[in-house]
Image (spheres, coloured by chain):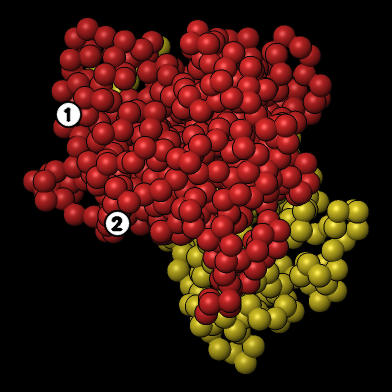
Chain colours: A red, B yellow
C-alpha cells in the first residue's frame, strides 16, 4: 500500500505486520502476542509433538487457566475429573514447551482477556491472537486482536505467524453523552441490536466518536469484547492518553527509554484524516437506554422500557420462524414489556464485565440492599488481581452482606463449563456476552445486560430498569 | 486430505444464526483430544430431555440417513472460535455445508478440516432449504453445485484454501518453509517487536 495514502489504524497495523505478501496466497502476518488457555490448545500442542516442532517464540506466548476452572476456593480439590485432566494437560504442555503459565496458584491467574491488559501485555499496535472469539477485547488498546481456531493456535505456536486476508474496515461512531444508568455494555448491545449478529462479517470495527473517547479503558474493553457478537473478526479503539495512562507502570509495559520509543510509535497509529472505511454506522449516545436481550442471540436486544417484538409483522420466513423459536425457548410472549419478568439467577462476571469497575458498579447498587429471596446471585471476578482489589475496597463484603456469592476468578457461568450453571428453565440476568440456547446451562434462559441492570434485577427479583430503583 | 467432488443427499436445517454452542455444547470442550465429538453434534436439539431422539429434528428423520451435505440458514457457525464445531460436523459425516453466509472464524476452521463452507445465492438457497433428501453434486475444481435437472450454480472460495484442499497441501508445512522470511521480519523489527521476557 502507498504510504502517502491516508490509512485507518487497522490498515497501519496490518501493513506493519506483513512478513510475506505473494499473489494468490494470503499474507503471512506476524503475531506479537499469543495468549493461551486450557480449552483450545491441547490438540495444537499435540500437533507440535506429532511433528517434532517446538514453540518458536515462547517469550511472546502466555498461558492462563480460566474456562474449566472451578470458582470455589482454589485450595480445594477439583471434583470434575475431566476438567482437572484438561488443567493438568495445560500444566504439562506449558512445562514441556517452556511457556509461562499463570495457573490456579498464581496471583496473576484470570480470564485471559482480563489478565492480558492487567499485566500490561496488551499494547497498542500489536497483533494479538488467542483461541477464543472474545480476543477482540484487547482491541481497546488499539491492537488488532482476534480469535483463532485450534489449527491456527498450532500454526502460531510453531511459526509466530498466520495466513490472513485483510479485513474490511467498519467505523462505528458513538457521539454524545451516556445518561445516568446507561453503561458501555448498553452501547455495544445497542450496536448489535442495530446491525444484527452477522452485521460485521468480514470486518474489523473501529469504535470512534466523542462517547468512546470519554470512556475508561475497562469500558472500552467491554465494547471491543463483544465485536464478535456483531459478527466482526475484531474491534478496536485508537490509543490515546487514557490508553497510555492505563498501561504505564504495569509489569510488561515498556520502561524508561523503551517507553518513550513505544509512545512515539503508538502515537502514529490513529486513523489518518481523510482515510475511508468500507462501512460506517453512527449511534446517538444521548438517547440510549439500558439494554436487555430477550431472545437467543445477542442481536435480540431491546431498551429496557421496550416491548418484546412480535413475529406477526415479519416478512422473511426464516427470520420469523427464528423469532418464534427464540420466544418459545425463552417462554416469553411477544408485544409485552420484558421489564418485570421474574428471574432466578443473576451472574456478574465474564470477560465482558468482570473488571473492578464492573464490580464497583454492581456494588454501588447492592450496598445496603438485599438480593431477592427468589434469586441466586454469583459475582465472579475476572482475575485474582480483580478479586484482591475488590476485597481491598470491601466490595466482597457488600456482595456477601446482600446475600450474593463472591467467588474465585474464571469464566464461570458465562459458558457453564466449570459446574456454575443454570438449571433447565431458569431465567438469568447475566453480564456475559452470549444468550444462545443452553449457553449458561442446558435449558437455561439468559437476559444479557450491564452490571448496573444485573444488580438492580438481583434486588427486585425481576428484570429492572436501574434508573427506577 | 484431498477433496475434489462430493455427491450426496442433503439434509436441511432451516434456521438462521446457528451458533457453535448448538453445534457442540461447551460442556463437551473439556476433552484434550479430537475424538468422540461427532456423537455430541447438535446434542441438545437431537435429543429430548428424557434422552430419546427428537423425532422432529431434521437430522433424526429417516430421509437424512447418509446425507453428507447440510443446508442451513444465514450466518452459520456464529459464536465461539471452537474448532470442535467443524471436528464434530466432520466426525458425524458431513463434508459440505451450504448457506447464504458463514461466521468468519467458523469458515476458516471448516476449511482447515476439509469441510466445505459453500455460499450460494439467496434465491437458489431458498429453494434448496425447503426440503431434505435431494441429491446435489459439488465440484470444487469448477466451484459449482449441480442441482437436479443439471442446473449449476457457482460458489466463491478463497483460492489458496481451494488449492490446499484440491492438492492436499499441508498449510503448517507451507508456513514452516517461510522461516527465512519470518526471521528476516523479526530482525527488521527488532526494535519494535515487543519482547515480553
Return the chain for callout 1: A
Image location of residue B167, percent across then percent down? 54, 58
- Is A146 located above or below residue B148 in the figure? above
Asked whether residue B172 is in view, the answer is no
Q: Residue at coordinates 74% horizontally, 56% vertically from top-left?
A: B42
Local SS, label 1: loop
Q: Residue at coordinates 64% horizontally, 50% vertically from top-left?
A: A341
- Which mark is on residue A267? 1
Image location of residue A275, percent across then percent down? 16, 50
Farthest residue, direction left: A4
**Residue A251 falls in image quadrant:** top left
Image location of residue A125, percent across then percent down? 28, 31
Q: In this figure, which residue is indicated by the disc labeled 2? A: A281
Of labels 1 and 2, earlier in sequence is 1
Return the chain for callout 2: A
Q: Residues within 10 Å of mark 2 (few under 14, many from 20)?
A: few
**Residue B13 falls in image quadrant:** bottom right
- Which mark is on residue A330? none
Position of A362 with respect to A16 (left or right) is right
Farthest residue, direction bottom: B149
Q: Residues within 10 Å of mark 1 (few under 14, many from 20)?
A: some
**Residue A86 falls in image quadrant:** top right
Local SS, label 2: strand
Inter-mark Cα distance, 1 to 2: 25 Å
Q: Residue at coordinates 22% horizontally, 29% vertically from top-left?
A: A240
Q: Residue at coordinates 57% horizontally, 70% vertically from top-left?
A: A310
Amino acid at each position: 500500500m502507498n504510504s502517502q495514502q491516508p490509512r485507518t489504524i487497522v490498515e497501519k497495523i496490518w501493513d506493519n505486520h506483513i512478513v510475506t505478501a505473494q499473489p494468490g496466497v494470503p499474507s503471512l502476518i506476524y503475531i506479537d502476542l499469543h495468549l493461551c488457555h486450557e480449552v483450545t490448545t491441547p490438540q495444537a500442542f499435540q500437533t507440535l509433538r506429532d511433528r517434532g516442532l517446538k514453540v518458536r517464540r515462547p517469550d511472546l506466548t502466555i498461558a492462563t487457566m480460566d474456562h474449566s476452572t472451578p470458582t470455589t476456593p482454589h485450595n480445594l480439590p477439583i471434583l470434575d475429573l475431566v476438567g482437572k485432566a484438561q488443567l493438568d494437560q495445560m500444566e504439562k504442555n506449558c512445562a514441556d514447551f517452556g511457556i509461562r503459565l499463570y495457573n490456579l496458584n498464581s496471583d496473576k491467574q484470570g480470564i485471559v482477556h482480563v489478565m492480558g491488559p492487567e499485566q500490561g501485555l496488551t499494547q497498542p499496535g500489536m497483533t494479538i491472537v488467542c483461541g477464543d472469539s472474545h480476543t477482540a477485547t484487547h482491541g481497546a488498546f488499539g491492537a488488532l486482536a482476534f480469535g483463532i481456531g485450534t489449527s491456527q493456535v498450532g500454526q502460531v505456536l510453531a511459526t509466530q505467524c498466520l495466513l490472513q486476508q485483510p479485513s474490511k474496515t467498519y467505523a462505528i461512531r458513538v457521539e454524545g453523552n451516556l445518561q445516568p444508568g446507561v453503561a458501555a455494555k448498553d452501547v455495544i448491545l445497542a450496536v448489535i441490536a442495530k446491525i444484527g449478529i452477522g452485521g460485521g462479517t468480514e470486518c474489523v470495527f473501529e469504535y470512534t466518536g466523542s462517547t468512546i473517547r470519554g470512556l475508561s479503558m475497562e469500558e472500552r474493553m467491554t465494547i471491543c469484547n463483544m465485536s464478535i457478537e456483531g459478527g466482526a473478526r475484531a474491534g478496536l479503539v485508537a490509543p490515546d492518553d487514557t490508553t497510555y495512562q492505563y498501561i504505564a507502570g504495569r509489569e510488561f509495559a515498556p520502561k524508561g527509554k523503551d517507553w518513550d520509543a513505544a509512545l512515539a510509535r503508538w502515537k502514529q497509529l490513529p486513523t489518518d484524516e481523510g482515510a475511508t472505511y468500507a462501512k460506517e454506522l453512527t449511534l446517538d449516545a444521548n438517547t440510549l437506554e439500558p439494554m436487555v436481550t430477550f431472545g437467543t442471540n445477542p442481536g435480540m436486544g431491546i431498551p429496557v422500557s421496550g416491548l418484546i417484538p412480535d413475529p406477526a409483522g415479519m416478512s422473511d420466513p426464516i427470520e420469523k420462524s427464528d423469532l418464534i423459536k427464540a420466544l418459545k425457548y425463552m417462554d416469553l410472549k411477544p408485544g409485552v414489556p420484558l421489564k418485570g419478568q421474574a428471574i432466578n439467577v443473576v451472574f456478574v462476571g465474564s470477560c465482558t464485565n468482570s473488571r473492578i469497575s464492573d464490580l464497583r458498579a454492581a456494588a454501588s447498587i447492592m450496598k445496603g440492599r438485599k438480593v431477592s429471596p427468589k434469586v441466586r446471585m454469583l459475582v465472579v471476578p475476572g482475575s485474582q488481581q480483580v478479586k484482591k482489589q475488590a476485597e481491598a475496597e470491601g466490595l466482597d463484603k457488600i456482595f456477601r452482606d446482600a446475600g450474593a456469592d463472591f467467588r474465585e476468578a474464571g469464566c464461570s457461568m458465562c459458558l457453564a463449563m466449570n459446574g456454575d450453571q443454570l438449571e433447565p428453565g431458569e431465567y438469568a440476568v447475566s453480564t456475559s456476552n452470549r444468550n444462545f440456547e443452553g449457553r449458561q446451562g442446558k435449558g437455561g434462559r439468559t437476559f444479557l445486560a450491564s452490571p448496573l441492570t444485573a444488580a438492580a434485577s438481583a434486588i427486585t427479583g425481576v428484570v429492572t430498569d436501574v434508573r427506577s430503583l | 486430505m484431498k477433496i475434489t467432488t462430493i455427491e450426496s443427499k442433503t439434509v436441511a436445517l432451516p434456521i438462521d444464526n446457528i451458533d457453535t454452542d448448538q453445534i457442540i455444547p461447551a460442556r463437551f470442550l473439556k476433552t484434550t483430544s479430537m475424538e468422540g465429538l461427532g456423537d455430541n453434534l447438535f446434542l441438545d436439539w437431537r435429543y429430548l430431555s428424557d434422552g430419546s431422539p427428537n423425532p422432529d429434528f431434521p437430522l433424526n428423520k429417516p430421509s437424512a440417513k447418509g446425507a453428507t451435505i447440510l443446508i442451513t440458514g444465514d450466518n452459520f457457525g456464529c459464536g465461539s472460535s471452537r474448532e470442535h464445531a467443524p471436528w464434530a460436523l466432520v466426525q458425524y459425516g458431513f463434508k459440505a455445508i451450504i448457506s447464504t453466509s458463514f461466521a468468519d472464524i467458523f469458515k476458516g476452521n471448516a476449511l482447515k478440516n476439509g469441510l466445505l463452507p459453500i455460499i450460494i445465492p439467496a434465491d437458489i438457497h431458498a429453494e434448496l432449504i425447503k426440503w431434505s433428501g435431494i441429491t446435489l453434486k459439488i465440484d470444487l475444481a469448477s466451484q459449482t453445485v449441480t442441482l437436479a435437472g443439471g442446473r449449476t450454480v457457482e460458489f466463491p472460495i478463497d483460492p489458496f484454501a481451494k488449492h490446499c484442499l484440491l492438492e492436499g497441501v499441508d498449510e503448517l508445512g507451507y508456513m514452516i518453509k517461510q522461516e527465512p522470511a519470518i526471521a528476516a521480519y523479526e530482525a527488521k523489527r527488532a526494535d519494535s517487536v515487543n519482547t515480553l521476557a
